[in-house]
Every structure is written in structure tokens, then in C-alpha cells.
Amino acid sequence: METVQIDLGERSYPIVISQNVMDLRQTWASLPKSAAALIVTNDVVAPLYLARLKQILSQQYAQVHEVVLPDGEAHKDWQTLNLIFDGLLSNGCDRKTVLFALGGGVVGDMTGFAAASYMRGVPFVQVPTTLLSQVDSSVGGKTAINHPLGKNMIGAFYQPQLVVCDLATLDTLPQRELSAGLGEIIKYGPIADMQFFDWLEQNIDGLLRRDRALLAHAVKRSVEIKAWVVGQDEKEAGLRAILNFGHTFGHAIEAGMGYGNWLHGEGVAAGMVMAAELSRRLGMVDEHFVLRLRTLIERAGLPVRGAIIDAKDNAGRYLELMRVDKKSEAGEIRFVLIDRAGQAVMRSAPDALVREVIDCCCA
Ligand code: NAD
Ligand code: GLY
């Protein structure tokens, strides 16, 4: 069993990574004592893993309640969030109740936000079951729901007590979702570790075949990088923004196409190519770097071109959506760009140049 520690003083916690780790009693032994647990999951993940998690947690908690949400990014909203509060209140859950998020990033982000606000804060645990949520969203305490005008616009920083990455749950993941997770993994190369990028270039085919040892390494290295970044800048005063490489363009695609039509990891993938191209046009990286990134993303089964989100004024619509991004300051869009491979920086860019990138990078 591999464990990566995220170091945040009294809010520190372990990320446990292993096959079938969900079924071990010792995995959960360190959690705060309570009479009740409530598992939040969705109608796709529940038939696969809910009974297993419930069975093991029943050995530790007298009551184990459940809330099963409708699946999908389109349901990452107030109405669905309220179903978690309905479940907590109708079961008489007190402030010691431990919430468990069983599912991908959508369930994790919503459960975390519910935990942050129910009775002003109850403990919660992430049990991520997608590659994307294991390597990114379950770690670091960002919780949120979407607003029709912007992605992840309403939320809180709220750290879990524990993250349990059971690699065996990846066996049932659809191939498109596996690729989406690889998008967030690839991100860690240009922003933090080009040796890891080299390793991904060598092993991308094995990762797509779900080689267990390769997946275990990719999850562990990704989590190590994320823990290192978040440990220095929990609330994104500066450094943490590098984790948003590709996200400014990507979020515009997700919102512009309607939540759920492009997967988050797909938007990030095309967004990374666009951000790399913008970096190149600003003289920060060369053509070779953009080509390497685009090639790896394509080999991972991900889109390398952005979507047309407005037939009349595509670039204008992108700019409009990107101005709502959380990194924007006084209406100025700030991008995570690559200065040289392995060095990410936050920068603004002239609208005319951004328009050129959008025009050349969208299909
Ligand atoms: P998701 O939660 O929608 O899961 C993808 C699909 O896979 C869903 O249909 C889900 O039900 C299904 N699924 C989950 N586990 C499965 C399994 N083991 N077998 C079969 N099917 C399974 O999407 P995601 O890619 O996990 O997460 C994307 C979300 O995460 C976005 O909302 C994004 O904004 C958020 N996110 C948050 C952070 C953060 O730091 N909090 C970081 C990155 C992404
Ligand atoms: N996924 C971006 C972050 O956690 O900061």
C-alpha cells in the first residue's frame, strides 16, 4: 500500500493508493469516532461499489446512510446539492457524522461542499473512483458546484480527513473517462516535472491498456506533485494556480458546449494545447514543445482542438466565458502559460493574440 501525505498542519491527511484497499478495515481505522456515516454516490457508481463500502463501514459505524445522486456534470448544481442536505437532515445526522464521497470528481466536489456547509462543517472522506478524481480532484480541498454562467463558481476550500484511491475501481471505468483522467495526469509534466512527461511519452500505450503497475505509478506521482503544490499554497494565493494549466480555455469549452457534453479532462486537454500555443506566440516555448504536448494528448485519446462554441463569434464567446474565470482580475483574463518546459507562470495576453490562438486551435 502506498501512502502520500499532504502536509497542511492540523489539516494534514494521508492519500492511500492501492488495489482493493476499500475492503480493508485498517484503511478506515484512523477516522474520527462517530455513530453515523453517510455515503454520497451516484446512480452509476452505486450498483458497482456502494454495497462494498457500506459493508466495511458498517463494522465501524452503527448507522451507515446513503444518498444516491443523479449522475453527471449537468447535475453539479444547487438542486442536486440539496439532495445531500435532505439526506443528512432526514436521517437526523449530527455534526460528528462522517460524509464519504464515493465516485468521480462531480460527487467528490459536491460532497465536499456539503460537508463544508452542513452544520458549518462536518468531517468528510474522499473515495475517488475515476482516474481523474484519484489524480486530482479528491486531493487539495477544492469543493464546488457549477453556475450556468461559470464552472465551479460556488464552493469552498475544505480538506477531507482521508483520501482512499482504490485502483481496482478503475477496472470498470469507460475508456473515454480513462483518457479524461490521463489529461489531468499529462498536465503535471509541463507544470512541474518534465521527467514524468518523458515517462508518460514512453508508457502512454500501457496506461491506455490499464497496466496496473503503470497506473499505480502515474497516480502516485500525480498525487505527490499535487500534494507538494497544495502544501505550499492551500488557498491559491499564487503557486496553486499552476494546477489550472489548460483550464481557462477548457472551462470555457465545458460551459460553452453545455456541462457534460465535453468531459472536464477533454476540455483541459484541448485547453492545454491552446495555452501552449499562446505560450509559443508569446515567445515562451518553441514549436517542438507544442508538438510534443499535442502528440502525447492525441495518443492519450484526447481532443487537441477546441470546440466551436459560437458559430457567429467563436473567439468573442470564449473571451466572454474566460473573463468569468476565478483567476481573472478586474476583468483581465490570466492564463497559466509555460515559460520553458517544467516552468509554469501566470500571465495575461492581448485579446487580439488570444483571438488568433482560438481561431487557429478550434475545429
Ligand atoms: P465524473 O465524476 O462525472 O465521473 C465520470 C463518469 O464516470 C461518471 O459518469 C461517473 O458516474 C462514472 N464513474 C465514476 N467512477 C466509475 C467507475 N469506477 N466505473 C465506472 N464508471 C464510473 O467526472 P470526473 O472526471 O471524475 O470529475 C470531473 C469533475 O471534477 C469536474 O466537475 C471537475 O470540475 C472536477 N474537478 C475538481 C477538481 C478539484 O480540485 N476539486 C480538480 C479537477 C476536476
Ligand atoms: N485542480 C486545480 C486545483 O486543485 O487547484
Image (tube, helix red, strand yellow):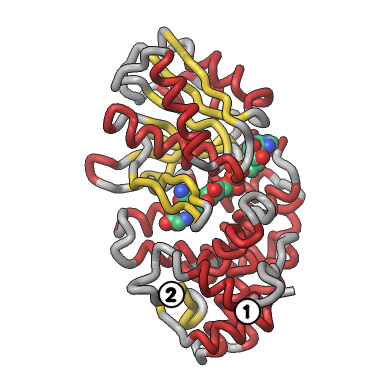
Look at the numbered disc 1 and give the secondary structure of its residue.
helix
Q: Position of residue 252 (x, y in %)?
A: 56, 65
x 30%, y 48%: residue: 7
x 35%, y 25%: residue: 30
x 40%, y 39%: residue: 113
Residue 31 position by quadrant? top left
Q: Position of residue 128 (x, y in %)?
A: 54, 38
Residue 330 position by quadrant? bottom left
- What mark, if any, has residue 333 been given in the picture? 2
Q: Position of residue 26 (x, y in %)?
A: 44, 22
> Would you place residue 54 above or below residue 103 in this image?
above
Amino acid identity at mark 1: Ile
Decide if ligand 1 comes within 8 Å of the CB at mark 1: no
Q: Position of residue 292 (x, y in %)?
A: 66, 77
Q: Is residue 164 visible?
A: no
Distance CA(mark 1)–CA(mark 2): 14 Å
- What mark, if any, has residue 263 been given in the picture? none
Circles 1, 2 touching at the beta carbon (< 8 Å): no
The residue identified by callout 1 is 358
x 27%, y 32%: residue: 120
Quadrant containing ligand 2: bottom left
Q: Residue furthest bottom?
A: 283
The quarter in which the C terminus is drawn is bottom right
Q: Earlier in the sequence, mark 1 or mark 2?
A: 2
Amino acid identity at mark 2: Ile
